[in-house]
Amino acid sequence: MATVLDDINAGVWEDMEARKRLVSLAELKDLAAAAAPARDAWSALGGTAVQRDQLKVIAEIKRRSPSKGDLASIVDPAALAEQYADGGAAVISVLTEQRRFNGSLADLDAVRARVDVPLLRKDFTLDEYQIWEARAHGADLILLIVASLSDGQLRDFSALSRELGMNVLVETHTEEEIERAVAAEARIIGVNVRNLKTLDVDRSVFASLAGLIPAQALVIAESGVRGVDDVTHYAANGANAILVGEALVSDATPRDRIAEFTAAGAAAISARA
Ligand SMILES: O=P(O)(O)OC[C@@H](O)[C@@H](O)c1c[nH]c2ccccc12
């Protein structure tokens, strides 16, 4: 039976085929070559040992989702990004998937023009075309979802991203997916507590899997942050960073929320040490 993820990926392919007819790979490569060099998301996320006592926040710009429906209209994504940056977000995630999340590359362009923090192009990466596209539009970090890719694709897509100066966030949801991420030499590994095949959220998945990730890698807790209790829970169980969407886009003062999450995370990490 087709999963939710299969359906999303099918739409992503169709939309990408349409974009390929408008912008050739050769044109994208020229745009990527002309873009300012990628920013260092690894360092921003505290990849250097010194900063591992902090909890970094990856703040996401997300209008809607298949699980929650409409979350926020976000007429001015750049203004939201500015609030995220002011609040101390280490990285800003911009959802560019159109059909289910109502995002676009135009959102990425608008955010890139406004803020200096590293940007994650958040999409369902299925083809190298999207990696060139990400770089051409100013992304510094891309998402690879293990459940959607073969081992060969994981390795090839990671290698291309690195050649373009970008980092890769490799997303997992099971023990086997973590093994595959590690085998592909992923340095930034996310555990999504939302199962993309069913959309069920189970926050306990993070605590049961985070310990399987090698110490050199950065561990990102993805999804399900409602407030400081969830932040504390993820930080206490080994997160170096959290990826937060809904709680920030539906908050009147996302800037303050990020500062609050950062403080709660640091407190939980010092209690764990
Ligand atoms: O809104 P939340 O529950 O804070 O979740 C954010 C982020 O983790 C979620 O948007 C996400 C995680 N992995 C993804 C892959 C594709 C699209 C979206 C996602």
Image: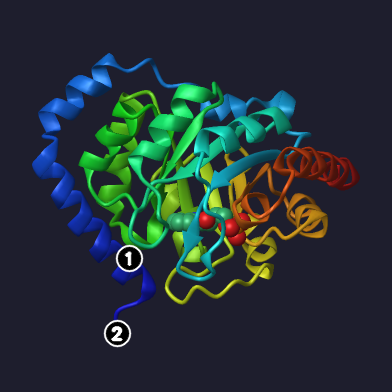
Q: Dot 2: what SS? A: loop
Distance from mark 1 CB to nearest ligand 1 atom below 8 Å: yes
Task: Tell me if label 1 and label 2 are in contact, CB under 8 Å.
Answer: no
Rendered location of residue 205, percent (x, y): 63, 67
Q: Nearer the viewer, residue 263 or 73?
A: 73
Determine the residue positioned at 48% across, 21% down.
Answer: 39
Q: Which amino acid does the dot numbered 1 rest on?
A: Ile
Nearer to us of marks 1 and 2 is: 1
Q: Quadrant of residue 139?
A: top left
Neighbourhood count class around disc 1 (C-alpha, 10 Å): few under 14, some 14–19, many 20 upward: some
- Indicate the amino acid at tag 2: Met
- Residue drawn at 82 percent across, 42 percent down: 260
Q: Position of residue 268 (x, y in %)?
A: 85, 47
**Residue 172 visible in this rendered orientation of the protein:** no
To which residue does mark 2 refer?
1
Label 1's element? helix
- Give the mark, 1 or 2, whose residue is nearer the N terminus: 2
Vertical order, 61 against 65 (above or below): above
- The x and y percentages for residue 200 are 55, 75
Judged left or right of residue 257, residue 68 is left
Quadrant location of the C terminus in the rendered image: top right
Q: Residues within 10 Å of mark 2 (few under 14, many from 20)?
A: few
What sort of colour scheme is used for the picture?
Answer: rainbow
Q: Position of residue 215 (x, y in %)?
A: 63, 41
Front residue of this view, candidates 74 and 223: 74
